[in-house]
Amino acid sequence: MEFKELKKAIDQVELVDAHAHNIVSLDSSFPFIRTFSEATGDALSFAPHSLSFKRNLREVAQLYGTEVSLEAIEKHRQTLGLHSLTTKCFYEARISALLIDDGLKLDKKHDTEWHRNFVPYVGRVLRIETLAEQILNEESPDDSSWTLDSFTKAFVERLNSLVPEIVALKTIAAYRSGLDIDTHVSKEVVESGLVEVLQAGKPVRIGNKGLIDYILTLSLEVAERCDLPLQIHTGFGDKDLDLRLSNPLHLRTLLEDKRFAKCRIVLLHHASYPFSKEASYLSSVYPQVLLHPHSIYLCNVFWLFLIYIFLFLKVFLDFGLAVPKLSVHGMVSSVKELLHLAPTKKVMFSTDGYATPETYYLGAKKAREVIFLVLRDACVSGDLSLMEAIDAAKDILSRNAIAFYKIDVDTSSSIPQSRISPKSEMEEPHAQEDSSSFVRVIWVDTSGQQRCRVVQAQRFNRSVKKNGIGLTHASMGMTSFYDGPAEESKLTGIGEIRLVPDLSTKRIIPWTKQESMVLADMLLKPGEAWEYCPRETLRRVRNVLKDEFDLVMNAGFENEFYLLKNVVREGKEEYVPFEVGPYCSTSSYDAAAQIFHEIIPALESLNIAVEQFHAESGKGQFEVSLGHTIAFHAADNLVYTREVIRSVARKHGLLATFVPKYDLCDIGSGSHVHISLWKNGENVFPASDKSSAHGMSSIGEEFMAGVLFHLPSIFAVLAPLPNSYDRIQPNTFSGAFQCWGKENREAAIRTASPPGAPDGLVTNFEIKACDGSTNPHLSLAIIMAAGIDGLRRHLQLPDPIDTNPADVAATLNRLPETLSEAVEALEKDKVLHELLGQNLLAAITGVRKAEVQYYSKNPDACKQLIHRY
């Protein structure tokens, strides 16, 4: 029997990870070695000798292309940065939804919101014991000691207020006092337990059985009323629990309490190891119980009782953590035993990922491989038909969790092809690749042109993804008018670097399914970046901002472009607007609607968020605004957005151009960029209250003041063509004067308070000068560098301009009116030279000077720029 169809279905399904924990910063005290082991303290010294440790270490090394050692992997992690690591791991894991229990105490963990940068849907799971402890650590509302009544009122009110923000509740009663829950615990017992807990002092840790039983009962009442699932930890976990009390059979009293008969319950963690068969049985006889076997360790007891529970109550099972932490034989054996009894409609997948993105990758990868082998054997033995096995796989890995947790996520096959490629001893060997499949390796040069080399997928996988492609030094010295290096760039055809793919950016091309594309870094040799590499430049400056100020810069671009059609007039070809409607015209949108119905889904398939799109002021001009994200990701997204728009337009017989000033008699096209600052997952740009003079925090003001101060120099990167300065004119919404204003679209920098922001508080600022010919990584790097200088020198903003700057031009500095002026300012700006690198800026200014010289002699040549940008 052929099982390629089953394997393909399992590899392509978008996973719903129904239970995991927060990822931590790279500088967290959490040791990376614990990615591969549950051991702590002295026991960690033995971890590298386990089968699972050795296997998982090899697989992470293969993922990153490093040597198979902890040291090599950790060095690679520090070089790549957490955002790129997480992007890569989640992309390869192909996780479409993530439910996070944020109650696990981890040093420097990122909040739930931060994870939305990497997964389309993120939901919060609320740990009830943590909530109770938070309340008891606070002062009682009436400033007296907590009583059972005051605690009950506070707990229920707080829990009810959080219901709209969460997808499930979770209890760790098994860790603390065991699963023999008394749902009718007496008031006297609870009051005594509360006194005991409070007398132990703060921070409060609830371990009293009576109080825990009471909190769980209160939570079940809320869960019943609000239709929330409850995850119940069972089986082994923290080393301080009494394993005998974590047997899920103890839950029988709770499960048979008629008050909670309609509650949806998940038996969580490790398939209740070492009581997995008991858990499987519970799920088979209790309709409200579902299994989250995110650890698949099983034993050989109590089968009959478990069957009873699984069949008659809503009990479900979760599996995951043990998937990457058992031997291969152990994983397969465990899942087979799990499915002996448990209905496939009541088993759900989760990684139990925690602290590092690699835990998510390993859990997802092994889950696919093991599920394939188990269901394949079920087909061979005659338990399942092939189609039943495919259906079961989709249920276990995705559909059961979507239905159970009632989450809104699309896991249809329209999502790009499988991003996780299980290559191990479990995979069928000698799989042949299609020789007509290609990979585009993309880079953006100093002049902002997007270029690519194309290789067959076979060669890419065999060699290029690890070793890269040779590229001449001259490639970063090329101009917009000639594919050769500018003399003053100091870059020539002598010397070669490696164009090495960043595999975390590899994407299936939406408009041609036989091809994929990937962004590349420029390396002198493996592990050694070239100083002219734009992506590495942004990484270096990003690290300075993080290391010195513990800040992360987010960015979002507005892409303005023209759609042109080719016509023949008097025997000559020329490009003209494909329609002529005004700003935000419905008729203009109607004319382009078919194109946008392809552009927007294509962008979403690349995980690029689109906030809005509309017709702009120019004839045939449109705008697509992207959502904000971490700066490095925003720059990558902009590259792919340009690719999508140009390619879809070409498919419809049109030319999309981002050139700054396509028609000197029409409005120009910008690529306005919005900037904000974040710390620990929170936007720190707004002031903490409304008393701030400008609605900005001191950090936000100093950063923006640095950008404003260096704006003349920055122009040479944000507006890199002589044609760019035809756009930057007064009264054209392009920011011609060195000033800032609150919601002032004529100011060079505009502060924004979008809908939903507290009145008067600024969430981000917009730079108007940036246009579609810029290199996005260099642009964000130089903006960030200017902001860093503002923070270092504690620069202050001048008063905002609340009128048209052109009306008070005599009191303001005119920003560079030509590229020559901008280049001169950049050459004098020693601060930016220090942060971005002397040689890189010499190359940039050399290319810009060549642009100035050429277009001053050939003014009509700028008309050909529509084919380059």
Image (cartoon, rainbow, N blue to C red):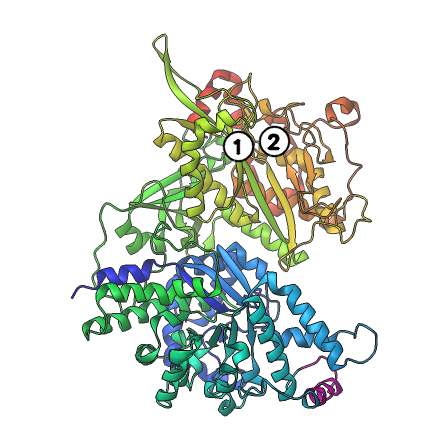
**Could you tell me the amino acid type at mark 1?**
His
N-term mark: 2 or 1: 1
**Could you tell me the amino acid type at mark 2?**
Val
Q: Which residue range is magenta in the image?
A: 190-205
- Name the one closer to the observer, 759 or 638: 759
**Label 2: how many residues lie within 10 Å, few (<14), some (14-19) or many (20+)?**
many
Q: Is residue 103 above or below residue 634?
A: below
Q: Is residue 811 left or right of residue 664?
A: right
Q: CA distance from mark 2 to mark 1?
A: 34 Å
At which x and y percent is residue 315? Answer: 44, 76
Which residue position is annotated with label 2? 823
- Image quadrant of residue 467? bottom left
Which residue position is annotated with label 1? 614
Identify the residue at horizontal 54%, vertical 59% (top origin): 115
Query: Residue reaching furthest top?
Result: 570
Work out whether residue 588 can be spotted. yes
At which x and y percent is residue 412? Answer: 37, 53
Circle 2: element type:
helix
